[in-house]
Amino acid sequence: MKTLRGLRVNGVLLVLFACLFGCVGCVSFDAAEARRGQTESFTNELDRLEAELLARPLSLEDCVAIAMTNNYAVRRADLDAQLGRFSQDMAFSAFLPQVSASVTRIDYDKDPVLNSQRFTSGGVDVGLAVLMPSTWFLYDEVRHGRSAAELAAGYVRQGVALQTTASFYEVLVQEKLVAAAERQLAAARETASRVEGLAREGFARPWERDQARYLVEAREAQFGAARRALEVKRGDLLRAMGLSPLAAISLVSPKEEALQPLEPLDDLVLRALETNPQLPIADRQVVMKENAVRRAFCDFLPNLSLFGQWSFTGNKVMNPPSHNFDWGFRGTWNLFNGFRSVADVRAAKAERRKAQLARENTFLSVMAGVISARAAVEDAAAGAKVSRRAWEVAVGKAEDLMARAKEGLDPVSDALDAEAARDLAEVEFLRAAYTERVARANLAFAVGGAPADGGCPPSPPEAAP
């Protein structure tokens, strides 16, 4: 019988050891296979998102909405805010009773027939903090840390919205640049064909024919570069939206509308000081450091707690088993810890002063950022106005010189130079018009609001063939 019992015990121990080894043992890892599996899983997820989100042309609002759910920075900020909530819950647990229980059982079997005994013991311990001021300050510090994390998540969302808005407009302007480059290439080819005919009839010099051919080659190179740049900018927009940069995307241009006049600078600055999330975050950092000072001072105070303990023990001989219950107050007071506590208080006060200085610097930075952003909007608006005027003048000059060149009144080279200047003026106008829209979005971000849709800038007039 003793041998059979020993075999059963050994078998149970072997099974337990096998389960433990299976749970905590080493895990085999094939790096190549893991990389292939991760790549396949990630690309399949990107394909699924592409099929769901990019099946139709997207407006600016659609792109921003997709970025708010898929962008890496947004998702990470949301996780940080969630971790802040978990930290607050963990800090609150210090106010709750701490309960622990234990049970021990011992089988003593010297002689299975005569001397078999069983010893059992256990207990429950309960502790509750009654006077522990540092706990309150620690909880309040964590609570403000959670609020700061949530504000930071909102600030990250505004930054991602600004980035997506800028990328959206860059793609639109690049699409117009590609269309302009294609139109310029077609015009250059038509002009080259006309100059070829004039050269055969002796009305154009050979170098003018070569200049027309060169213009075609230059326009072909510009067209290719514009198309490649469009692929890059589309990839940047897709990455900001959390999608594959290789996906195909189609955008809807905003409606052409007049821009609203800018608010006075003083009003913008005051609104920024009320709504920009950087300042509330800095305020909470100061409060957290103030709580750290109070928590360091609490090291000089005693801590009181209430405890209760119930325990029992017994065996086959002792029936019923004995029970014990104790309760009371427990106090601890650190009377002297060298100069560590004094140094902790001084260090906490220095950290609080650093947080106050950082808040003052943030205050000034927000004001300066609004001033700079508003000036950038005015500069962009003035530049767009001048660029449009330059484009209109260049169009009229190119049309006049080309008409005069057809009649033989002016050299063909002057007409070709005018066409090149017209094309360059068109590109500059498109860039300046969209720069104003991006500058307005940046101003809204500096004030503290979400970047607004500034509409689509007016299209430049079509060039005469």
Image (cartoon, helix red, strand yellow):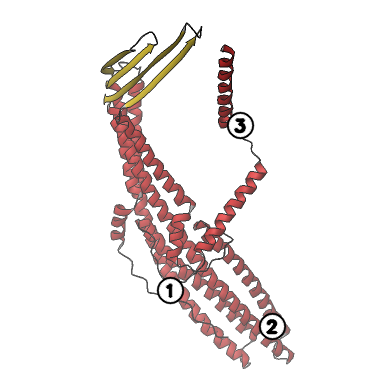
Rendering coords of residue 427 (x, y %): 53, 73
Residue drawn at point x = 40 percent, y = 44 percent: 82
**Which comes sooner in the sequence, label 1 or label 2?**
2
* One can see residue 463 in this view: yes
Kind of residue indicated by mark 1: Lys
Estimate how packed mark 3 is, as few (under 14), some (14 to 19) or many (20 or more) residues with alpha carbons within 10 Å: few
Residue drawn at point x = 32 percent, y = 39 percent: 143
Q: Is residue 251 left or right of residue 358?
A: right
Q: Quadrant of the N terminus?
A: top right
| Tag 3 secondary structure | loop
For mark 3, what is the residue?
26
**Which quadrant holds residue 417?**
bottom right
**Which comes sooner in the sequence, label 3 or label 1?**
3
Q: Quadrant of the C terminus?
A: bottom right
Q: Nearer the viewer, mark 3 or mark 1?
A: 3
Rendering coords of residue 233 (x, y %): 55, 63
Kind of residue indicated by mark 3: Cys
| Tag 1 secondary structure | helix
CB contact under 8 Å: marks 3 and 1: no
Rendering coords of residue 72 (x, y %): 49, 51
For mark 1, what is the residue?
385
Residue drawn at point x = 57 percent, y = 15 percent: 6
**Which comes sooner in the sequence, label 2 or label 3?**
3
Q: Nearer the viewer, residue 420 or 305?
A: 305
Mark 2–mark 3 distance (CA, rounded to whole Å): 78 Å
For mark 2, what is the residue?
208
Relative height, residue 80 to residue 20 (above, below) = below
